Image (cartoon, helix red, strand yellow):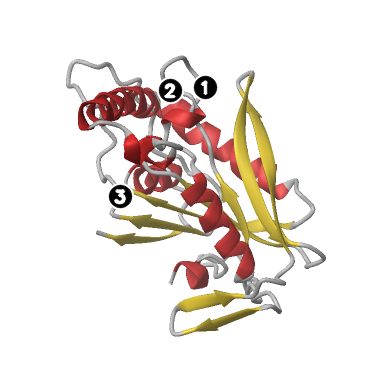
Amino acid sequence: ECLRLATERSGSGSGSEGVRAEPAAAVTVTGGGATISEDADITLEPFPVEFEGYTYEGWIAYEKGAPPRPQVLVIPNYSGLKQFDKDEAVFLAAVGFVGIAVDIYKQVPGYMNEDRSPNSEPGWRELPREKKQEIAAAHMEGAFKQVDYCVCNPGFFRDSLGAYLAAGRAHPAVHPTHAAAIGYCFGGMAVLEMVRGGLDFDAAVSFHGVLQSRPSSRDMVVNERENVYGGHTKVLMEN
């Protein structure tokens, strides 16, 4: 459903007939799943995006030699960008899109890249239970500081994602107009914020997304921004 929505405009008078993504030649798609051949010519590479003086470490996946294809932003859950999100970007590239794994978290002491998925770090299984609990607590604290910053500052939240759309459209592998965004939980909330911000993209797919963008404490101040809906974005919420 996401792949279909990502390349079809709504009947909003835009005059666009849409651009359908064609699966890569080395990929077989059956029954809603995909079998990706080992010889699929998919490239995954760093995709740095500068926003408000800071360079965020995104990743882009695309098929070499293919014509420009619609981009699909992959917005992570509360933990931030990790290997899972890169894998999703590669899958999207393999089935005929350009996948862009988004990072909007700054590297800060106590929450660096290696803190985002601690149970995938070498030696995790051998740690005593108490140490795992300590690391997990620090992970949650660091992650939700990042989450709270985003939801308390919807201007930053929406505009940083808009910067990814713009950077994607400037990439030679990406179609100049057609775009979509998907996300789970925090990522699902993020795609809804893109809609509320009136960003120019075709489809938002929210998987179990948080419907209300509110911080973890009622004492936190939210720097509200007015909602401006673009009107043509199709929205699918799986909840």
Can I make out residue 166 in this image?
yes
Q: Secondary structure at mark 3?
A: loop
Tell me the residue at 63%/74% (across/down).
Answer: 20
Name the residue carrying label 2: 111
Farthest-out residue, bottom: 30
Farthest-out residue, left: 218
Q: Is residue 224 above or below residue 46?
A: above
Farthest-out residue, right: 65
Please state which amino acid type lies under the numbered disc 1.
Gln
Name the residue carrying label 1: 107
Q: Quadrant of the C terminus?
A: bottom left
Tell me the residue at 64%/18% (across/down).
Answer: 53
Location of residue 206 (image quadrant): bottom left
Callouts 2 and 1 close, C-beta under 8 Å: yes
Can I make out residue 15 in this image?
no
- Distance of label 2 from label 1 (alpha carbons): 6 Å
Q: Secondary structure at mark 2?
A: loop
Q: Which circle, 3 or 1, is nearer the viewer?
A: 1
Name the residue carrying label 3: 209
**Circle on res. 92:** none
Location of residue 236 (image quadrant): bottom left
- Distance of label 3 from label 1 (alpha carbons): 24 Å
Q: Earlier in the sequence, mark 3 or mark 1?
A: 1
**How many numbered marks are there?**
3
Please state which amino acid type lies under the numbered disc 2.
Tyr
Q: Position of residue 197 (x, y in %)?
A: 45, 39
Residue sitting nearer the eye, 199 or 93: 93
16 lies left or right of 150: right
Callouts 3 and 1 close, C-beta under 8 Å: no
Residue sitting nearer the eye, 82 or 209: 82
